[in-house]
Image (spheres, grey):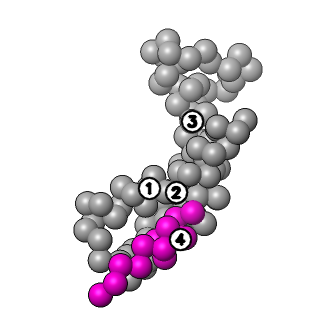
Amino acid sequence: MRRKWWIAAGVNLLMGVPAVVPVWLLWYIAVNGPLAELGWTVREPTENDGMLLWLVIVAPIVTAFVLLWWLANDFARRWNTTAARVYWPVCALVTLVPSLTLVILT
């Protein structure tokens, strides 16, 4: 059986485009929450409503995206014979390519 890696790569690159939103939301929470508490970043000065509101907004969005990503990759995995320990981390990294491209270009 031939490894059809291009199916998995295409699915994850396409999933990477809407992944920009959950990645940005997670980054925003990290920068204004735990990383600011540790002193690694400076909290946004106008962000004084607390983080609970952000968690109420972010949790459903991230959960929906992760579920959709998992289902799409589970479907694409049927045509790929790569070992699971290689397949899933590579798919996660390929999904981050559009977000990393935006970070590098801006």
Question: What is the span of residues highlighted in magenta in the rendered image?
Answer: 1-13
The residue tagged 3 is: 27
From this viewpoint, which residue is outermost toward the front?
Answer: 2
* SS at badge 4: helix
The residue tagged 2 is: 95
The residue tagged 4 is: 11
The mark nearer the N terminus, 4 or 1, is: 4
User: Residue drawn 74% across and 20% down?
Assistant: 46
Residue 40 drawn above or below residue 27 = above
The residue tagged 1 is: 92
The mark nearer the N terminus, 2 or 4, is: 4
The mark nearer the N terminus, 3 or 1, is: 3
Q: Residues within 10 Å of mark 3 (few under 14, many from 20)?
A: few
Residue 79 drawn above or below residue 28 = below
Q: Is residue 78 visible?
A: no
Q: Amino acid at mark 4?
A: Val
Q: CA distance from mark 3 to mark 4?
A: 23 Å
Q: CA distance from mark 3 to mark 2?
A: 16 Å
Q: Nearer the viewer, mark 3 or mark 4?
A: 4
91 within the magenta span:
no
Q: Which image quarter: residue 82?
A: bottom left
